[in-house]
Image (cartoon, helix red, strand yellow):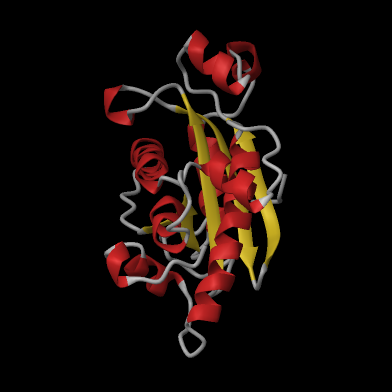
Amino acid sequence: MNDLSTVPNVLSGKALNGAGSYAVVDFETTGLSPHQGDRAIEIGISMFRDGKEVGTYASLINPGMRIPSFITQLTGISNDMVSSAPTAREVFEEALAFVGDAQLVAHNASFDRKFWRRELSEELGIECQRQFVCTLMLARRVFQSFTSHRLGEIARVLGIDTGRSHRALDDARVTTVILATMLDRLQAANPEQTIDGAFLQTYQKKARTQLPDLS
C-alpha cells in the first residue's frame, strides 16, 4: 500500500497529483444505497497520468455491520475478511490523500459518487462536491455501436483482461484502461482540443446524435 501519511486539509488542496491526473475509483458495498444504511466494504483507486497508471490504492473496509450473503457471493468479500480491516475513517483519510486534486472518475459514477460523498461526510465531516467523470456515460457516446456499456462487456469487446470482477481495484484498473482508450480516440477525433477533465465532463452530457461514433 502507498505511504499516505499526509492528508490535505481541503478537498482540492495542494496537489499530490497535478493537472492531467485521473483518480479512477471503484467501491464494493453492502448494498445499493448509503441513504438506506449501506456502507463501503472495499475501495480501489487507480491513478492515471500521461497515458499510464502511476499508482494504486486499495483497502478492505470494516463497515461496522454484517455483509449480506449475496454480496459475499458476488464479491468474495466475507465478514471474516473485513473484521480486522481498518475503519472507514482511516481508509478515507488515506484515500483522500492519495487522490489529491486529480480528476475523479468512475464507471457508473452516480453509484460510486454517493458512497464517496457519504463516507467523507459521515466519517470526516467533509462535504465533497467535486464532480466525477463517468466512463459509462462517456462510453455511450464514444462507443456508440457497442450493444452494452457494462464494464465487463466493454472490456470484452476491447480485449481487456478483467481480472477479478467485483473486486474494487481490479474493476478500477479495467476502468482505467477503458478511459485511456477513450482519451486516445477523443484526441484523434479532436486534434486541436485539449482533452481534460473539463472536456470529458461536458462531452459525457452531450446528446449522442451530436457526436461521432468512435467505436
Q: Is residue 69 left or right of residue 181?
A: left
Relative to 191, is 124 above or below?
above
Residue lying furthest top: 69
User: Tag count in the figure?
Assistant: 0
> Is residue 100 visible to the viewer in this orientation of the structure?
yes
Residue 171: x and y in percent read 60, 41
Image position of 62 with respect to 7: above or below: above
Residue 147 vs residue 67, the one in the foreground: 147
Question: Going by the image, does 16 lie left or right of 53?
Answer: left
Q: Where does residue 2 sit, x and y in percent of width and height?
A: 71, 50
Name the residue at 42% across, 42% down: 112
Query: Relative to residue 145, is residue 185 depicted above or below?
Result: below
Q: Nearer the viewer, residue 153 or 67?
A: 153
Report if residue 67 is visible in the image. Answer: no
Q: Quadrant of the N terminus?
A: top right
The residue at the point 59 percent across, 72 percent down is 184
Q: Residue furthest bottom?
A: 192
Image location (x, y in percent) of residue 152? 57, 40
Residue occupying image coordinates x 58% and y 67%: 17
Q: Position of residue 131 (x, y in %)?
A: 35, 59
